[in-house]
Image (spheres, rainbow, N blue to C red):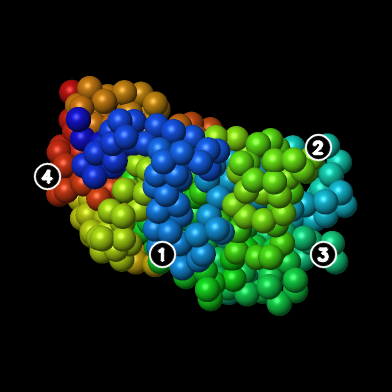
Amino acid sequence: MIYFDNAATTFPKPPCVVKAVNEALLRYGANPGRSGHDLSLQTAQKVFECRERVGKLFHCQPEQVIFTKNCTESINAAIKGIVRPGDHVIISDLEHNAVYRVVESLRRQGIIQYDVAPVFADDQKTLWHFEHLLRSNTRLIACTHGSNVFGFCVPIEQIGLMARRRGIFMLVDAAQTAGLLDYDLRRMPIDYLCMPGHKGLYGPAGTGILIVNTEHLPDPLCEGGTGSLSMEPTMPDFLPDRLESGTVNTSGIIGLSAGVGFVLQNTPKKLYLHEMQLCDYLYQKLCGIRGVTLYSDRPCLERNLPLIALNLKNINPETAAEALNRHHIAVRAGFHCAALAHQKMGTDRYGTIRVSLGAFNHKNEADAFCMAVKHILAGR
């Protein structure tokens, strides 16, 4: 199988991740932070090592790293833990439903109002539209760093600087960029950074991270046992305990630690360059195939992610994806849980086919994909 669905979940996982999960199930099965015996302490140390590695990758302190089950939970925890009744929020028109549905739900409950800022190829034009949606009660800007459908990058640093000058919180959805683009939270104006563990960090499914990069701690989304201050009726006021109630996904986190180690060893810069070079190669080959509709310009470093949105002639995207599957090629077709992005690009009737690349893809697979596309367009 040629796997071109890395924007959903990277696969295969590095061998070090498989080894780490197996080792976790065999050697680190105790509950971390809940007991004082050796096995519990050893397990807790392995969990802390993951916090340290994440801190090294994103330039933050280990205690700022909150473990969740996915990026969606991280986003929910941050937004719902920050906003107050009467607040105003701004999002972009490229947002995943993990952001869009949260703010829409809060609006329907009468808790907040929100506006949608359009994103353009011109960063200054994008910034202008965000700035001109500000209100006196704007509390939060929640913005993806890169579209999961079309691969467009958003100028989050410029938007974040504008927000910070006005005392507005900045949340970044790094679902498609964590592990690929460099983040330095010591200097970047990001207050809440949300990411999955199972995509660009090459960890197992069921892992996610929220990094809190401000002294303003969100209210807990979930409350319960933390292994600390157990006689108190309220959640602790310090991280990570305040936002981590209940037992964490120990084996998943130990696997995630190995995935982050893989990224640190190979560096986001090298991984991104490899994937973008392959993306450019595939894009140019697709440009030469009659009947292929591409929804973005040629991939450009720092402007795009290594994914291509396309359609084939008059073939429904789902039907085309099924045909590709018969050629043993895995892609994702449809709406990609991103209604706003499809409305923006005019693909909201049928959706698109998304080809997304990872660290283990290579040119031979790109060639095979193009050959399969030609066969499908020819009706074979």
- The residue tagged 1 is 56
User: In the drawing, what numbered circle is on residue 135?
Assistant: 3
55 displayed left or right of 274: right
Instruction: Say which element carries label 2.
Output: helix
Is 372 rendered above or below residue 267?
Answer: above
Considering the image in quadrants, where does the C terminus appear?
A: top left
Visible residue check, residue 49: yes
Three-letter residue code for mark 3: Arg
Q: Nearer the viewer, residue 310 or 2?
A: 2
Name the residue type under label 1: Lys
State the image coordinates of residue 258 (x, y, percent, origin top left).
31, 48
Q: Earlier in the sequence, mark 2 or mark 1?
A: 1
Residue position for label 2: 108
Residue 353 is drawn in which quadrant?
Answer: top left
Q: Are marks 3 and 1 in contact (CB under 8 Å)?
A: no
> Tag 4: residue type?
Asn
